Amino acid sequence: MKNLIKTVSYGLLIGLMACESNEVTQQLTATEPIINAQNTPEESPKRTKKIKLAILLDTSGSMEGLLAQAKNQLWKIVNQLALAKDADGEDPEIELALYQYGNDGLSAMDGYVQQISGFTSELDEISEQLFALRTNGGSEYCGTVINEAIGNLEWSANEEDLQIIFIAGNEAFSQGPQAYAEACKAAVNKHVIVNTIFCGDYNEGARTHWNDGALIGHGKYMNIDHDAKIVHIKSPYDEKIIACNARLNKTYIPYGKQGNLKKEKQLVQDENAMQLSSANATKRYMSKGSKVYKNTSWDLVDASDKKGFDITKVNKLPENMQSMSSIEKMTYIETLKTQRNEIKSEIAKLSKERIVFVQNEKRKNNSGTSQLDEVIVAAIKEQAIQKSYRFE
């Protein structure tokens, strides 16, 4: 009998162990990932490509015409950049920087060179500083200003990014203590193209080393008539675009310590553009309706597009938002964002029609002389295509 009990107990034990083993196997099988040909590793997020453009302007006494062209034509250059797409059809990040050189009002210790603005996507800052520039005297050191821009601006180390310097002036490119050849080589080593723009006769510029600087900098040598009359072509679409801008300005929500101040600056730059001409103002408003014009540091609508945006961590909101709940604040932001996108779509449609109209008018009245915006836009398009960018 004892042997029978032992045998039965042993059998029960074996059975229990078998059941437990089967249970464990089922659990492991349930939690094990199914591997097949369709499974792929998670892709890392795509890196947004960049276009970085630094403009170096001679502000010596003879450069009033150059400054006038820069002030009048900034927004046409921005509008061209706004059309850029990378090889994948994505929008690149656009940043501009501004230097002046050759002005006797600047420090001799610094080689008569000044950084007006580092790279920024907030283009009202560039416009404000550009309108504040004045000409004075002249010791124009091209090598020095290129060297300063290469050393002090935040350039990208990625070769896929498009990085360009445009330097414009009218004295010998070889002046000053810094060898221009070394400065241009340093630019190339940082994947930066150096384009040179001589304000005067093409052959004189070539003779005074402006062409040589562009060759070393893997860029393009160009010349302009900096004293040529600036012609703004009006179109049937201007008044509609100006009206759109008035509505667009109402969609901005200033926040933070400088929010109201920067909102005021935005309106001042609208007025600066209008004082030059209504056609020039229209080009600025076309830029404001494009993807390039962003103000994340002071406008809640733009800031809300940034990854990790948290309305509860935003300081100094406008008075009308202070009593709102977090949900009400986000609803208010989204409402204005929708309005802004609708206005931008309207501006984009009018802009395309205006561009076609202006191109046709220019063909009728071609003066044969190039100005700053024309040579910069031509070089940008040529060099962007080499980096697989396209313009739509």
Image (cartoon, rainbow, N blue to C red):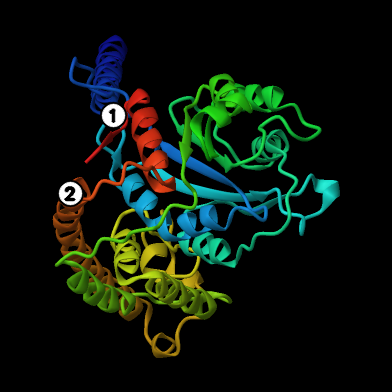
The picture quadrant where one finds residue 87 is top left
> Of helix, strand and loop, which one carries label 1?
loop
Image position of 146 (left or right of 83): right
Q: Nearer the viewer, residue 392 or 13?
A: 392
Residue at horizontal 25 percent and vertical 14 percent from the top: 11
Q: Is residue 273 visible?
A: yes
Quadrant showing the N terminus: top left
Q: Which-is-in-front pick, marks 1 and 2?
A: 2
The numbered dot on residue 87 is 1
The picture places residue 93, in percent across and down from the top left corner, at 41, 45
Q: Quadrant of residue 48?
A: top left
Quadrant housing the C terminus: top left
Q: Nearer the viewer, residue 333 or 246?
A: 246
Taking the image as shown, residue 320 lies to the left or right of residue 54, namely left
Mark 2: few, some, or many residues within 10 Å (few <14, many ≥20)?
few
Residue at 18% in and 58% down? 354
Q: Pointer 2: what residue?
A: 364
Q: Position of residue 375 (x, y in %)?
A: 40, 39
Q: Which amino acid does label 2 sit on?
A: Lys
